[in-house]
């Protein structure tokens, strides 16, 4: 448990040879299959939590990791084994959350197939498909009035202070009914500018 705690916080991690990262135009896993190992630069990642739990089977542990995007969890487990003076590998890996999405939001292929009904046009995916606003629920949001919604449809900038936007964003911009109009970013000068606009100008 203490060794796992040593691998938390801001750390540098060397990407594994079996990753999809490209070096000189070739993916590392392609080079690894050809028996070629190349030097990889360590990259900064953040591990917020790395906890291990004993299991009834000797030498086998369960673990839980909360980490930043770009973290190689298999490499983290390998680093833990090295820190303990031996080795370690994973028997299985299950992602339980990505951003604001958890397993409660996940659906099996069987559920999706059952909803499709097998007949073209008969599918009922209600409850399975998210609206654009729901898909961006992890972003800070701004709800604007009808006048601002019309300006957003033309890609015009917004005043951050007027809409209570604090920070650089990105911000999900919603119409009065909560539908997604676009995604805006703060420019540091009090303006919010469009990165993506879904509302079309009429």
Image: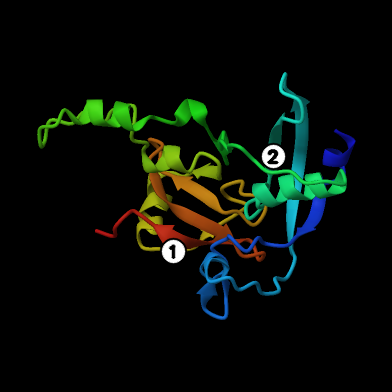
Q: Where does residue 137 sit, x and y in percent of width and height?
A: 50, 39
Secondary structure at badge 1 equals loop
Quarter that holds the C terminus? bottom left
First in sequence, mark 1 or 2: give its number: 2
Q: Where does residue 136 sit, x and y in percent of width and height?
A: 48, 43
Q: Where does residue 124 sit, x and y in percent of width and height?
A: 21, 28
Q: Which quadrant holds residue 32?
A: bottom right
Q: Which quadrant holds residue 135?
A: top left
Q: Which mark is residue 156?
A: 1
Q: Which mark is residue 66?
A: 2
Q: Is residue 6 visible?
A: yes
Q: CA distance from mark 1 to mark 2?
A: 38 Å
Q: Is residue 98 left or right of residue 167?
A: left
Q: Where does residue 108 sit, x and y in percent of width and height?
A: 37, 30
Residue under the point 54% across and 63% down: 20
Tell which of 88 and 184 is nearer to you. 88
Q: Is residue 147 left or right of residue 194?
A: left
Q: Is residue 100 visible?
A: no
Residue under the point 64% across and 57% down: 168
Quarter that holds the N terminus? top right
Q: Residue furthest top?
A: 56
Neighbourhood count class around disc 2 (C-alpha, 10 Å): few under 14, some 14–19, many 20 upward:
some
Q: Is residue 17 above or below residue 136?
A: below
């Amino acid at each position: 448990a203490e060794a796992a705690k040593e691998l938390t916080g801001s750390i540098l991690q060397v990407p594994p040879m079996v990753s999809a990262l490209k070096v000189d135009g070739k993916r590392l896993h392609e080079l690894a299959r050809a028996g070629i190992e190349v030097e990889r630069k360590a990259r900064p990642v953040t591990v917020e939590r790395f906890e291990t739990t004993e299991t009834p089977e000797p030498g086998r542990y369960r673990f839980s990791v909360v980490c930043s995007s770009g973290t190689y969890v298999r490499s983290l487990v390998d680093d833990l084994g090295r820190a303990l003076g031996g080795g370690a590998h994973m028997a299985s890996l299950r992602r339980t959350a990505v951003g604001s999405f958890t397993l409660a939001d996940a659906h099996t292929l069987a559920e999706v197939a059952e909803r499709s009904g097998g007949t073209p046009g008969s599918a009922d995916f209600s409850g399975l498909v998210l609206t654009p606003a729901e898909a961006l629920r992890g972003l800070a949001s701004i709800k604007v009035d009808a006048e601002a919604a019309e300006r957003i449809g033309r890609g015009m900038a917004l005043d951050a202070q007027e809409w209570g936007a604090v920070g650089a964003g990105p911000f999900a911009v919603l119409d009065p009914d909560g539908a997604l109009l676009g995604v805006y970013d703060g420019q540091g000068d009090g303006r919010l500018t469009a990165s993506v606009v879904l509302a079309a100008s009429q």
